[in-house]
Image (cartoon, grey):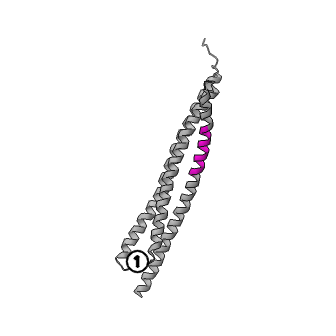
Amino acid sequence: MESTTPPVEQSAQDRLYDDYCRLRKEILDHRSIAVQMLDKTLLTVDTGAFVISFTFLFQLTGKGAVHHIAFIILGWAAMALAIFFNITAQFLVSKVYDWRQRQNDLIYKQDSGRIEPEEVRDLARLNKRCLSCGRAAVALSNLQFFLTGAAIALLVVFVSVNMVLFAQAKV
């Protein structure tokens, strides 16, 4: 006769630790995905537009004078700012995830009754840091999207104006 043992029920402490580990893994996974997506997408767009504009400019300089150079300079400046904002936002996001991970550690200690008084204060500070850096990262990302759009628009205007002027010069 086979003996069957009833399933062992997890203690509250074990469930708390399992929840802590699950949340910690989710934070790390989301951090990695967020940084990778932001990096790949936005830097590809910015650097691609930058390279294409350089190529077009070098092709035009062989055909004659380039007109309205301010458009391409402003476009490049907007792209440079967009790339800077992108890198800064990525840094802030990584800091938020680091702080969120520390915050999760402290919440686990608090729930398990092993938190020190100074760590309670750290928990409140970490929450404020996460919120303010998160807001700053979102604001920088929004600025970066705007600047990328403005840069592409300026480059399109530059290319269009010069193409029309070169076509008129041939006639």
Q: Is residue 120 magenta?
A: no
Image location of residue 153, percent across then percent down: 52, 69
Q: Nearer the viewer, residue 100 or 166?
A: 100
Magenta span: helix, strand or loop, mainly? Answer: helix
Image location of residue 44, percent across then percent down: 46, 57
Which image quarter is the C terminus in? bottom left
- Which residue corresponds to the image point at 62% horizontal and 42% vertical from the top-left? 128
Q: Please indicate, yes or no, whether residue 26 appears anywhere in the rendered image.
A: no
Q: Which residue is mark 1?
A: 66
Q: Residues within 10 Å of mark 1 (few under 14, many from 20)?
A: some
Image location of residue 65, percent across then percent down: 38, 79
Name the amino acid type tagged 1.
Answer: Val
Image location of residue 87, percent across then percent down: 48, 52
Q: Please indicate, yes or no, whether residue 44 appears anywhere in the rendered image.
A: yes
Magenta extent: 125-137
Q: Nearer the viewer, residue 39 or 137?
A: 137
* Furthest-bottom residue in this view: 171
Query: In the drawing, does residue 22 fall left or right of residue 168?
Result: right
* Number of numbered discs on residues: 1
- Which residue corresponds to the image point at 48% horizontal and 62% vertical from the top-left? 79
- Which residue corresponds to the image point at 47% horizontal and 56% vertical from the top-left? 43
Image vertical order of residue 80 relative to residue 69, above or below: above
